[in-house]
Amino acid sequence: KSVIFTKMPLNQEFVSDPALDFSDCVDVGSIDTISAQFEQHYNDRLSTDTALTRGLVSFQANKTRSVYRWYKFKEAFSAELVEYLLERYGLKVGTVLDPFAGSGTALFVASGLGLAAEGIELLPIGQRIIETKQMIDDLVAADLEDLSRWAANPPWRKVGIGKPLLELRITKGAYSDETAQDIGKYLAAIDSENGRVRSILLFALLCILEEISFTRKDGQYLRWDYRSGRRQGKTVFNKGMIPSFDESMLSKLNEIVSDLTAGEPQQELFTKQVNPGQISLRCGSCLDVLPTLQPSSYDGIFTSPPYCNRYDYTRTYALELALLGVDEDRLRNFRQEMLSCTVENRAKDLLGLNPRWNVPVCAAERQGILKMVLAYLEGQKKLGRLNNTGIPRMVKGYFYEMACVIFECARVLKNGAPLIMVNDNVRYAGASIPVDVILSEIACELGFVIESILVLPKGKGNSSQQMGAHGRESLRKCVYVWRRI
């Protein structure tokens, strides 16, 4: 049964005097104690769901799915997870919104189940993945023949001089000279194809860039293989054998052709039904786009925002962004437009962006646990114990901006509609931050009831940097289910 959470007196104690400085008196133990007390109030809704595996809430379960497997979008959840939760919570008709669409998994699964689906996505790599997948239904037999020809007899091998490779400062030296030349030849060769085939071929190239490079995505940045001549931190990273361009590209093209030409009955491309729902995508930051949407117009939201974990997607997807023509200025702008989840995010003027957000900003300011966490992090910053001084600013920005997102989600949802969100708790300087409880508390103030917080049986461990100092204590990985009042 859905219950609106009643505030503990501690919250009011912490907001009674905003000038008070708790940075010298808050420690990890006090945060853990108060967090445990708050979690007790959610005892009837915090429940372990044995159906939720780590693979299900990540990209792993997509590896065997046609089309979904083409591009390894590491931050994605699986199509199976979307199917499971949409069915469990009765989302069978209407329109579903994903404000952080990523590679579009929620959109395509919802569409395949007959729902209309709308997404918002900031980064061009996510936009390109979604747009390419949408194009599949427009392919004709001749297009499939052309793609098969590319897989059987690679045209780029006949190109003399290729196109110059677009680079950013953070991607220079990412490929061997031979691989860089092959990429240029491939880009020159695809220009002779029609728009549909060219889009699929460019997408295939995006799918293999990491594989053929001296880099590996590592959340906060690109890690660099020792052969690149670059260093990331004090460690020397050995990627092992790096396949040639031809080897990777032919493998990817054959995979794509196989998925597109598989005989009936075939495993779903996008869990297709007779009448799939329409998919539409809005490009930009959800902080800009959400306020433009009509109120009470969506039957459900299914999403996974960036986690409060310092991951910088403008760095981890830099190879792809560079290939898509993103320059240094646009890269910096994307980094600041993202939800605050990396230490390079500057504080946003939320009330300057939208005066209506006074309501969610005040809701965030009333959270006692959050004030304790921020006070503790500021104290650790003063003592020089944080590995980056931007962490307190990032954590504060994350929760205040998420409050604004929650406020807008409540505004655009119909009464009784569910919001389903995948998210992780995090830890900094030994302090476990109960993201699930804090965001649920904010949601209660902004028009939601907390139906359940589904907890994965296996939690997430400490980062390697914190494990030595703070042990291997696991953190909750959850799926929140809130319902609009």
Image (tube, rainbow, N blue to C red):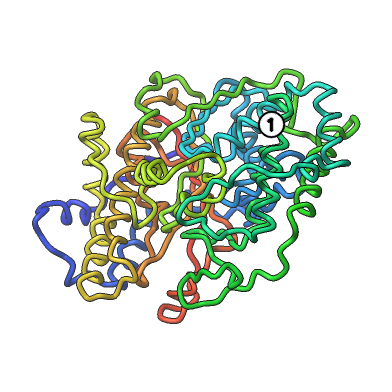
Provide residue 211's location: percent of width, then percent of height.
Answer: 67, 57
Q: How many marks?
A: 1
Q: 365 or 73: nearer the eye?
A: 73
Provide residue 68's location: percent of width, then percent of height.
Answer: 70, 41
Position of 360 compared to 204: left or right? Answer: left
**Is residue 393 positioned above or below 95 on the image?**
below
- Residue at image position (25%, 67%) is 376
Mark 1: amino acid? Asp
Position of 267 compared to 441: left or right? Answer: right
Q: In what element is the residue under mark 1? A: loop
* Residue 247 seen in the current view: yes
Q: Quadrant of residue 137?
A: top right
Q: 93 or 239: nearer the eye?
A: 239
Q: 363 or 170: nearer the eye?
A: 170
**Is residue 464 positioned above or below 125 on the image?**
below
Extreme residue in the bottom direction:
468
Position of 189 compared to 32: left or right? Answer: right
Position of 140 compared to 344: left or right? Answer: right
Provide residue 430's location: percent of width, then percent of height.
Answer: 37, 72
**Is residue 340 positioned above or below 126 on the image?**
below
Residue identifier under label 1: 191
**Is residue 287 positioned above or below 474 on the image?**
above
* Residue 440 seen in the current view: no
- Residue at image position (52%, 47%) is 422
- Residue at image position (74%, 32%) is 271
Residues packed near mark 1 inside 10 Å, few (<14), some (14 to 19) or many (20 plus): some
Provide residue 24's location: percent of width, then percent of height.
Answer: 17, 72
- Residue at image position (51%, 29%) is 97
The quarter in which the C terminus is drawn is: top left
